[in-house]
Image (cartoon, rainbow, N blue to C red):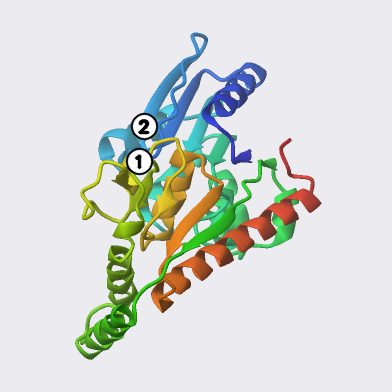
């Protein structure tokens, strides 16, 4: 089964119900390091294995011997790369082939778009979905339930001077002129961080903010990795989508507020986020049509 958007208490209940209904003798919980799933059931042996350790020899051969149809595999927030052929995924598939009992928990159904959902389906049945692209009809072919997370995206629009605009354009031109063989993605990254510096005077001491790094040296401005469960105002976005997805998981935020300089690079990141939220909404709508929706 695949369950999308649940909290840890809901996940634990599902595991317990599944164990009790299927005569499970052992549970393996694979989890990403930032999202451990505590689970302790006196009636069944449970082992927790961190995502990065899935490929380790010390686990691989032992698990292949130990996993059978009396074992439940739980994958908790293990959608970590869009590469469907990733080595860690491939090792996990070997484990999955040993048992029919598998539960996949993810906060979001994808990292970037619905093609990533195929990675979750591969955990359930790699052979069935091998080489196939995502189709909405797949949502009705497995035990899939979705608890939607809907987001609002608002901006705090600030004023920048003409001098700042000229500096921005000069920096952009310089980055293009000196790009050489470097990754072109470094250009928006650097411009976005520069634009973030223009927002320092708009940081209020009684609110919490998130930024790419610690350059502001203020107690109420944290980095994405430091985020905890509360609302933050976004100064600048991380470059990688998965880092922002993790941030939303940790904080539980659904109302996103972004300080917008009005410079083109900020507009790019805002529009990119809005497009992602739209794709997410479309997935939830399809899940609802196929009646794969949690209350």
Count residues near mark 2 (Cα–Cα under 10 Å), then give few for <14, some for 14-19, many for 20+. Answer: some
The residue under label 1 is: 54
Q: Tag on residue 126?
A: none
Q: What percent of the width, then of the height, locates residue 264?
A: 42, 78
Please say if the residues under marks 2 and 1 sit with CB atoms less than 8 Å apart. yes
Relative to 193, 63 lies left or right:
right
In the figure, residue 66 lies in which quadrant? top left
Q: Secondary structure at mark 1?
A: loop
Q: What percent of the width, then of the height, locates residue 182?
A: 23, 80
Q: Quadrant of the N terminus?
A: top right
Q: Secondary structure at mark 2?
A: strand
| Residue sitting at the far top | 42
Q: How far apart in space, not on screen, are marks 2 and 1 (Cα)?
A: 7 Å
Q: Is residue 142 above or below residue 244?
A: above
**25 and 246: which is toward the camera:** 246
Q: What percent of the width, then of the height, locates residue 53?
A: 31, 39
Taking the image as drawn, is residue 131 in sight?
A: no
In the figure, residue 285 lies in which quadrant? bottom right
The residue under label 2 is: 49
Relative to 288, 159 lies left or right:
left
**109 and 1: which is toward the camera:** 109
Count residues near mark 1 (Cα–Cα under 10 Å), then give few for <14, some for 14-19, many for 20+. Answer: many
Decide which of tag 2 and tag 1 comes sooner along the chain: 2
Q: Quadrant of the C terminus?
A: top right
Taking the image as drawn, is residue 2 in sight?
A: yes
């Amino acid at each position: 089964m695949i369950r999308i958007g649940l909290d840890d208490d809901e996940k634990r209940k599902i595991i317990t119900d599944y164990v009790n209904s299927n005569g499970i003798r052992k549970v393996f919980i694979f989890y990403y390091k930032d999202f451990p799933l505590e689970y302790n059931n006196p009636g069944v042996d449970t082992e927790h294995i961190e995502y990065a350790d899935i490929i380790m020899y010390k686990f691989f051969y032992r698990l292949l011997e130990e996993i059978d149809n009396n074992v439940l595999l739980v994958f908790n927030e293990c959608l970590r790369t869009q590469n469907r052929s990733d080595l860690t995924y491939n090792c996990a598939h070997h484990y999955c082939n040993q048992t029919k009992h598998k539960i996949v928990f993810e906060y979001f159904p994808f990292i970037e778009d619905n093609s990533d959902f195929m990675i979750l389906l591969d955990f359930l049945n790699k052979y069935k979905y091998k080489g196939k692209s995502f189709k909405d009809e797949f949502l009705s072919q497995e035990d899939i339930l979705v608890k939607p997370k809907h987001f609002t995206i608002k901006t705090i629009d600030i004023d920048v001077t003409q001098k700042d605009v000229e500096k921005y354009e000069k920096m952009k031109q310089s980055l293009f002129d000196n790009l050489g063989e470097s990754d072109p993605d470094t250009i928006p990254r650097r411009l976005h961080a520069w634009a973030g510096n223009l927002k320092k005077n708009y940081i209020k001491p009684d609110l919490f903010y998130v930024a790419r790094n610690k350059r502001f040296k203020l107690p109420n401005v944290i980095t994405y990795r430091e985020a905890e469960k509360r609302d933050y105002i976004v100064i600048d976005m991380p470059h990688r989508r998965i880092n922002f997805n993790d941030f939303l998981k940790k904080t539980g935020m659904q109302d996103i507020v972004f300080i917008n300089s009005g410079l083109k690079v900020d507009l790019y990141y805002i529009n990119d986020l809005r497009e992602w939220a739209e794709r997410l909404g479309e997935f939830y709508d399809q899940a609802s049509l196929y009646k794969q929706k949690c209350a």
